[in-house]
Image (tube, grey):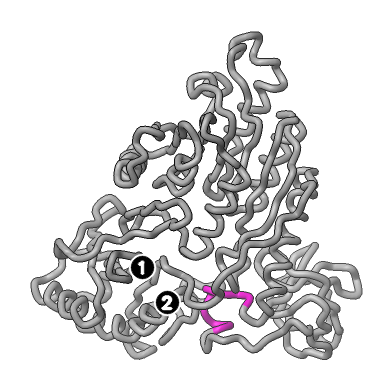
Amino acid sequence: MTQANEWLKVESLDLEAQGVAHDAEGKVVFIEGALPGEEVQVAVTRRKNNWEQARVVALRKESSQRVVPRCVHFGVCGGCKMQHFHISAQVAVKQRVLEDNLWHLGKVRPETILRPIEGPTWGYRFRARLSVRMVPKKGGVLVGFHERKSSYVADMTSCQVLPPHVSAMLVPLRHLISSMDRPDRLPQIEVAVGEHDEGRATALVLRHLEPLSEADIARLRRFAEEHGVQWWLQPKGPDSIHRLDEGGPVLAYSLPEFDVRMPFRPTDFTQVNHHINRMLVGRAVRLLDPQPHERVIDWFCGLGNFTLPIARRARQVLGVEGSEALVQRSQDNARLNRLEARTSFEARNLFELEPQDLLRYGSADKWLVDPPREGAFALAKALADVHQQGGLSGGLSGWQAPRRIVYVSCNPATLARDAGLLVHQAGYTCVAAGAVNMFPHTAHVESIAVFERR
C-alpha cells in the first residue's frame, strides 16, 4: 500500500494521461496530474489488489515538459487532460502508445515510423457536444463539458479548444437557456462549424424533450441573429433534426488539394479538426498512391471523406458503409464534385463480413480502411481466412487480395488487433505507421498504418 510520505518516480503515461509509477511494494499507481520523470507524493483515491489510483499532493522533481495550462477550467473540466504537458511531448507519448499497442497486442513492428501529423493546438474543435443542466446551487444553467470523472457539468465560461467565437457564446447560451420556458427539458446543444462561400457557418442543434413554445422560438431567432448562427432542433433521435428556419449557408468542409467540397449536417460524423483532416487525407492518398488504371475499395466510407479524393486519382472507387442514409449522402457528394462516374457506393453491415462477401465486392488493387473505434475485425478476419484457406477451395479463384492497404484508426488497440491478423494470418507486412494528433491536449490517439503484400 502506498504510504502518504512515500516519494514515487513517475515512469510513463497511460491512455488516460495518468502518470504511472510503482510504490515500494511494487504495486502500480496511476497518478492524476503527474508526468513522466517527476517525483511525487500522492493521496490514494482508490485501492485495488493490483493497483491504486491517486492524485498529486507534493512535487519534488518537476518534468522539463510541464507547462502552465492555458485554460482556467483545467483540472475541473474533463475535456482536456494533457494541457499541463508540452505539446511536443504529448505527440511523442501518442506515438509511443501506437508503437506499444502494435507490438504488445499485435506483435507487429512497422518498418518505418511516419512523422506525426500535427497542426493547430487551440481553437481546433469544430464539432462538440455541450451538456446543459439547470443547477440552482451554481446560479442557474450550466453549458459545457462534463467535469473530470463525473456526470456533473463543469461551470465553464470559456473553452480554449473551441473556436473563439463558439467559446464566446458559452455564457450567452447560459442566459438564453435560463430565459426559456422549460430549461430543465433542454439537455444538450451540439455545435458544428463549417465553411461556406462567404466564410464560416455555425450550427447549434438544440435537443428538447418537450415542444418549444412560440416565445422560445422567438428567443432562439433573436440569438441566431445576434450571434450569426443557425439553429437546428432535435425533438427525438438524431434522425429528427431539422432546421428552425430555412435558408442561410450550408455547412461544408473542403479538401483543396483534391478540389473536393463536402456538405454535411451538424450531426453527421465529420472530423472535429478540419486542418488535421486535410493533412490526414493528403497523407492517406499519397501512401495509397492510387493510379489511373486501378480500382480501390474504401471500407467505412462515411460521407466520402477519402472516397472522393481517391477518385480524383483512381479509375474507380467503391465506398462501403453501414448506413443507407450515409450511402445516399455519399452519392450526393460525389455528384456535387462531379465524381459520380468514378464512384459507386453500397450499404453493408461491415461488422458481419464473411470471406464470401469479398468475392461479391470484387478484386481491388488497393483498400482504404477507416473504421470506428471498434475497428475492422470482421474485414481483417475475412481477408485472413481467404489467405489461410487458399481461396476457400477455389471459390475465390478469380479474386485477388489488395496489394496495399492504408488503415486509418481512432483506436490504437483495435488497430493493433487487426494489424496482427493482417500480418500474421493474411500475408501482409506493416511497412509504415504514425500518430495523428487530431485531438491536442487529450489522450485520444489517432493513427495511420500501411500494409503491403509482397
Percent of width and height locating residue 67: 68, 86
Percent of width and height locating residue 81: 61, 75
Q: Is 90 situated above or below 311?
A: below
- Can residue 30 be seen? yes
The answer to whether 167 appears left or right of 65 in the picture is left
Q: Among all residues in the image, which is located at the extreme top?
A: 394
Instruction: Assign the magenta stretch its main secondary structure.
Output: loop
The answer to whether 387 appears left or right of 321 in the picture is right
Percent of width and height locating residue 281: 53, 52
* Residue, disc 2: 163
At label 2, the amino acid type is Pro
Q: CA distance from mark 2 to mark 1?
A: 9 Å
Identify the magenta region.
74-82
Residue 119 lies in what quarter of the image?
bottom right
Q: Among all residues in the image, which is located at the extreme front?
A: 292
Q: Are marks 2 and 1 in contact (CB under 8 Å)?
A: yes
Q: Is 58 situated above or below 317?
A: below
- Can residue 325 be seen? no
Mark 2 or mark 1, earlier in chain: 2
The quadrant of the image that shows the N terminus is bottom right
At numbered mark 1, what does the secondary structure look like: helix, strand or loop?
A: strand
Q: Is 3 situated above or below 292?
A: below
* Between 181 and 81, the one nearer to me in the picture: 81
Is residue 373 one of those drawn in magenta? Answer: no
* Residue, disc 1: 193
* Between 416 and 450, the one nearer to me in the picture: 450
Which residue lies at the image location 45% right of the left edge and 49% below the top edge? 305
Which residue lies at the image location 45% right of the left edge and 74% below the top edge? 145
Graded by Cα atoms within 10 Å as few (under 14), some (14 to 19) or many (20 or more), the crowding at tag 2 reads some
The answer to whether 92 appears left or right of 71 in the picture is right
